[in-house]
Image (cartoon, rainbow, N blue to C red):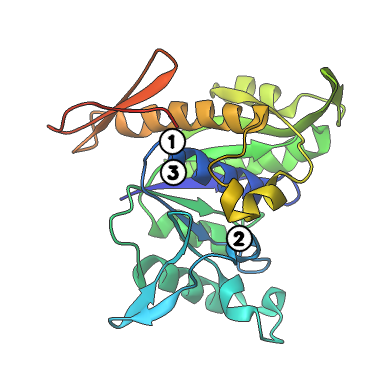
């Protein structure tokens, strides 16, 4: 199983949204995907996957929750009927919870596990970076100049831990009103940071109100279409290539696009075509 970090270095840029949408994009491309909600102080993944199968104790461990074939775990599942306030958890306890998610949760045959990082560059993010052999990290920012300062610290943390940055996503960049792109922030932080650190710029994403709420409805998970979801699919393919088309990894998945469709070859198995 490969691990992919989704990092911002700050809150409010839509890091969890990107994690959820990327998970959907990978799953639609027939990659068996998992998602760890590592934001112990503000777990929100469970709020979107609550209609799926919840985690259970099994064989001395915990089975991952399952929503539309996306395995996931979040502290939010264990706080639904609790008055405990997660943001009062001390760092050692938060780190212990993360260790439990990593080593006690049964992920079965997941190919790629996304880790939705908490904001900042403090103790919990550093522990994660030291505990997990990440294949790479995706950086999330908005276009706002104020966001750029904090996101830059997140990039520096990742690079200092010798984890490859696979690219930068600029989220909530504009609102599409009848074909007219209206900027939501002053600045171009995503592009600026990619140039400063010589990183790939994976694109500017629109703000699409209500998209996650629509994906909460199980019957819309596969059927829902939008330009944002199409763009996320393209980004997922690009990330997949960078993770598996790499000579340092064994049993590589090989990715290619032919005729608009994603084709995958896994080891000695024949190429299979997926239309998403």
Q: Nearer the viewer, residue 147 or 260?
A: 260
Q: In the current view of this chain or complex, which residue is farthest to the top? A: 259
| Secondary structure type for disc 3 | helix
Between circles 1 and 3, the one closer to the viewer is 3
Seen at 67% across and 86% down, the residue is 82
Seen at 44% across and 16% down, the residue is 260
Image position, residue 239 (x, y; %): 45, 31
Q: Residues within 10 Å of mark 2 (few under 14, many from 20)?
A: many
Placement of 274 over or under 134, stated as above or below: above
- 221 sits left or right of 31 in the view: right
Q: Which residue is mark 2?
A: 45
- 141 sits left or right of 202 in the view: right
| Secondary structure type for disc 1 | loop
Seen at 42% across and 57% down, the residue is 130
Q: Which label number is shown at residue 164?
A: 1
| Secondary structure type for disc 2 | helix
Q: Which residue is mark 3?
A: 27
Sooner in the amino-acid sequence: mark 2 or mark 3: 3
Is any part of residue 9 visible from this angle?
A: no
Q: Nearer the viewer, residue 235 or 100?
A: 235
Is any part of residue 168 visible from this angle?
A: yes
Q: CA distance from mark 1 to mark 3?
A: 23 Å
Q: CA distance from mark 2 to mark 3?
A: 16 Å
């Amino acid at each position: 199983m490969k691990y992919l970090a989704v990092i911002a270095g700050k809150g409010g840029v839509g890091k969890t949204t990107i994690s959820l949408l990327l998970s959907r994009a990978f799953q639609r491309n027939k990659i068996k995907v998992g998602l760890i909600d590592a934001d112990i102080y503000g777990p929100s993944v469970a709020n979107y996957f609550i209609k799926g199968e919840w985690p259970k104790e099994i064989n001395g461990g915990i089975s991952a929750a399952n929503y539309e074939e996306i395995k996931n775990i979040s502290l939010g599942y264990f706080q639904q009927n609790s008055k405990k306030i997660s943001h009062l958890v001390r760092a050692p306890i938060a780190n212990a919870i993360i260790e439990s998610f990593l080593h006690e949760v049964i992920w079965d045959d997941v190919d790629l596990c996304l880790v939705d990082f908490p904001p900042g560059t403090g103790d919990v993010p550093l522990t994660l970076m030291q505990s997990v052999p990440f294949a790479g990290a995706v950086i999330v920012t908005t276009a706002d100049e104020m966001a750029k300062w904090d996101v830059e610290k997140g990039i520096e943390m990742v690079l200092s831990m010798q984890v490859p940055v696979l690219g930068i996503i600029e989220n909530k960049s504009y609102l599409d009103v009848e074909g007219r792109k209206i900027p939501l922030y002053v600045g171009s932080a995503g592009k600026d940071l990619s140039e400063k650190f010589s990183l790939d710029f994976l694109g500017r994403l629109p703000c699409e109100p209500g998209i996650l709420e629509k994906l909460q409805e199980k019957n819309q998970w596969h059927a829902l279409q939008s330009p944002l979801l199409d763009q996320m699919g393209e980004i997922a393919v690009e990330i997949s290539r960078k993770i598996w088309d790499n000579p340092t990894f064994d049993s590589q998945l090989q990715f290619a696009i032919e005729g608009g469709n994603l084709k995958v070859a896994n080891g000695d198995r024949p190429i299979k075509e997926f239309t998403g």
